[in-house]
Image (tube, rainbow, N blue to C red):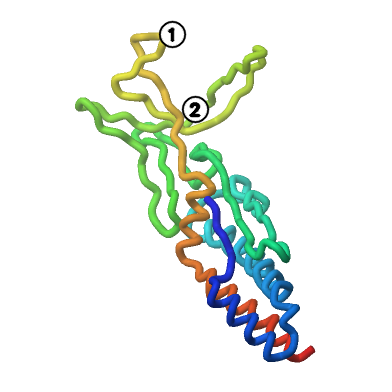
Amino acid sequence: MNITVEPSPALYLALQKRLREMGKSDYAKEVMRKAIRETAKAVKEELHSGARTLYTIKRGAFKKSDIKVTNPTKNQLRAILEVEGEPLALKASYQNRKNGKKKAASALIKAGGNMKELKLESGGRTYKAFVATMTNVSKDGKESEHVGIFQRVPGKYMKKNPHKEAIRQIYAPAKSKAAEGAYGEMDVKGELSYRLHKHMNAMMGG
């Protein structure tokens, strides 16, 4: 997910006109650069806090440092915020509850809802999700374990044991998806306008 913070041509022309009237037209780029930089910083803060308000994504799964910012320069009056990432393993990243004797493992992705049992109906059978510890073997033969939420895959069988259905790990929305939800509730243009007026007022008082 990429977010670009930059002024519209009309906004920049209005800034130039106002500064020209003040006899400070040479400061247009610097004023805009500062406003964009501050806006990008504010957007980064709001993206992170907003994502963690809207979703149950865990602190360790989505850090503020996961939002990369390319700040503006005098010759490039825009900032770019970038949030990357593949879908996240559900167990480690969002609120969840392990399975019991009768209930499947449950999860809550969006804040404010209820835990939902993770089960799939197929071919007259119910496939319940479950918490398990799996062993991974790297190319160099080293073994490592990880705990996740898994589920049998209807109609797909294990290569080493063709009588048992295969197992897949359940994943949840990526960091970029959570940030996208937060961005949808933001007014970036309004924030930039506010920061621009702030620096304009500082210039007038200087």
Helix, strand or loop under label 2:
strand
Quarter residue 74 falls in: bottom right
* Residue shown at 75% from the left, 78% from the top: 26
Left or right of 1 on screen, residue 65: right
Which residue occupies the foreground of this view, 32 or 65? 32
Q: Say few, some or many: other residues with alpha carbon within 10 Å of mark 1 (under 14 / 14 to 19 / 20 or more).
A: few
Q: Say few, some or many: other residues with alpha carbon within 10 Å of mark 2 (under 14 / 14 to 19 / 20 or more).
A: some
Quarter the C terminus occupies: bottom right
What residue type is disc 1 on? Lys
Which residue occupies the foreground of this view, 103 or 81? 81
Is 105 above or below relative to 162?
below
Q: Residue furthest right?
A: 206
* Residue shown at 69% from the left, 60% from the top: 71
Residue 160 numbered mark, or none: 1
- Residue 84 position in % (x across, y down): 57, 45
- Residue 63 position in % (x across, y down): 64, 51
What residue type is disc 2 on? Ala
Marks 2 and 1, how far apart at CA:
19 Å
- Residue 19 position in % (x across, y down): 69, 85
Is 198 above or below relative to 165?
below
Left or right of 153 on screen, residue 133: right
Which residue occupies the foreground of this view, 23 or 206? 23
Left or right of 175 on screen, residue 204: right
Is 15 above or below relative to 56?
below
Quarter residue 100 falls in: top left
* Residue shown at 41% from the left, 10% from the top: 159
| Precedes in sequence: disc 2 or disc 1 | 2
* Residue shown at 58% from the left, 28% from the top: 146
Residue 24 numbered mark, or none: none
- Residue 160 position in % (x across, y down): 43, 8
The residue singled out by tag 2 in the image is 132
